[in-house]
Amino acid sequence: QVQLVESGGGLVQAGGSLRLSCAASGRTFSGYAMGWFRQALGKEREFVAAIGRTAGSIYYADSVTGRFTIPRDNAKNTVYLQMNSLKPEDTAVYYCAGVIRYSATASAREYDYWGQGTQVTVSS
């Protein structure tokens, strides 16, 4: 079992950048595919980005392609979400998620473990 803790959220102006971190407990982090999802107020949770055990398997939502990246550092048991060129529509609670599998997946139903979320607010 793994516990996930997100950090790095906050308030930023449109066009700015933030880097979210998701720290995982346990010694088997390298065996997990990881994902980032977000949920805006009054909307359903949506996929943002996912990475498999290696950087050879990465998916991005169309809405963030070219602006967000999802690097991982297995030595630090951490996955990141680097967010650049932020827009007001990126405002949401961001969640990281993990599942034991090799390849990345964009399906929230595939993930077994979830963090508590971190708020990102982008002002116009």
Image: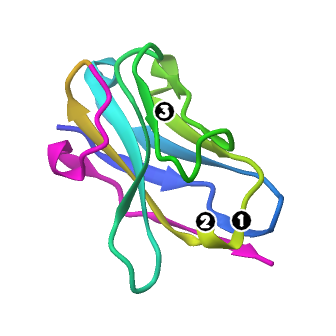
**Which residue matches tag 1?**
87
Q: Amino acid at mark 2?
A: Asp
Q: CA distance from mark 3 to mark 2?
A: 22 Å
Q: Residue at x 22, y 35 (%)?
A: 99
Residue picked out by circle 3: 78
Vertical position of residue 69 compared to residue 84: above or below: above
Residue 8 against residue 122 in the figure, above or below: above
| 73 on left or right of 85 | left
Q: Secondary structure at mark 2?
A: helix
Give the residues drawn in magenta, as a range: 103-124
Circles 1 and 2, Cβ within 8 Å, touching? The answer is yes
Q: Are marks 1 and 3 in contact (CB under 8 Å)?
A: no
* Mark 1, secondary structure of its residue: loop
In the picture, the quarter occupied by the N terminus is top left
- Residue at x 55%, y 44% (from the top left corner): 21
Q: Is residue 80 left or right of residue 123?
A: left
Residue 36's x, y, as percent? Answer: 43, 48
Q: Quadrant of residue 29?
A: top left
Q: CA distance from mark 1 to mark 3?
A: 25 Å
N-terminal-most mark, 1 or 3 = 3
x, y percent for residue 22: 47, 44
Q: Is 9 a magenta residue?
A: no
- At label 3, counting other C-alpha atoms closer than 10 Å, the crowd grade (few under 14, some 14-19, many 20 or more) is many
Q: Which residue is mark 2?
A: 90
Identify the residue at the far bottom of this view: 42
User: Mark 1 to mark 2: distance in Å?
Assistant: 5 Å
| 56 displayed left or right of 81 | left
Residues under numbered marks 3 and 2 in contact, where contact means CB atoms less than 8 Å apart? no
**Seen in the image, is 71 located left or right of residue 98?**
right
- Up/down of 121 relative to 82, above or below: below
- Can you say whether 53 is above or below 81 in the image? above
